[in-house]
Image (spheres, rainbow, N blue to C red):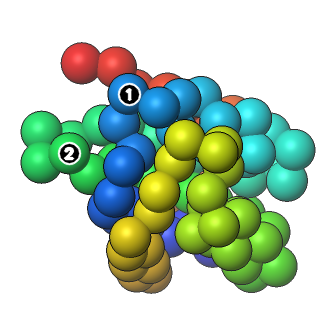
Amino acid sequence: MITQHLLVTGQVQGVGFRWSTAQLAHQLGVTGTVQNLPTGQVAIVASGTEQQLADFARQIKQGVTPWVVVRDLQVTAARTQRFVDFRIITR
């Protein structure tokens, strides 16, 4: 089990990105959180196997809905965290 921080830039707020990301995480067995940032970006903390997280990042980069446009995806390693499920954090 590993944990990664993902920072997503582009047309990712107000287009169902967080909800679609949570659905994708559930499908892949990834746990963690997703939240909008004041900068217009979206921050994700995701835990899973290397393969699960590689698939997760690849599908996010492709855009999880037709309305999402991902211009940049930064993935960094993080201290391993254990989550029960994948949650959307709201302000």
Checking the image for residue 14, the label placed there is 1
Residue 13 is situated, as x and y percent measured from the top left of the image, at: 35, 36
Q: Nearer the viewer, residue 4 or 15?
A: 15
Query: Which comes before the other along the chain, label 2 or label 1?
Result: 1
Q: Is residue 79 visible?
A: no
> Taking 50 as reference, is 79 above or below it?
above
Q: Quadrant of the N terminus?
A: bottom right
Q: Secondary structure at mark 1?
A: loop
Query: In the drawing, does residue 47 fall left or right of residue 89?
Result: right
Q: Secondary structure at mark 2?
A: loop
Q: Farthest residue in the front direction?
A: 66
> Taking 3 as reference, is 86 above or below it?
above
Residue 56 is situated, as x and y percent measured from the top left of the image, at: 70, 64
**Residues packed near mark 1 inside 10 Å, few (<14), some (14 to 19) or many (20 plus):** few
* Three-letter amino acid code of the residue under disc 1: Gly
> Taking 48 as reference, is 84 above or below it?
above
Residue 57 is situated, as x and y percent measured from the top left of the image, at: 63, 70
* Three-letter amino acid code of the residue under disc 2: Gly
Provide the residue designation for mark 2.
40
Distance between mark 2 and mark 1 Cα atoms: 10 Å
Q: Residue at x 38, y 27 (%)?
A: 14
**Residues packed near mark 2 inside 10 Å, few (<14), some (14 to 19) or many (20 plus):** some
Checking the image for residue 83, the label placed there is none
Query: In the drawing, does residue 35 fall left or right of residue 25?
Result: left
Query: In the drawing, does residue 36 fall left or right of residue 71?
Result: left
Q: Quadrant of the C terminus?
A: top left
Q: Is residue 27 visible?
A: yes
Residue 76 is situated, as x and y percent measured from the top left of the image, at: 40, 80
Q: Farthest residue in the top direction?
A: 91
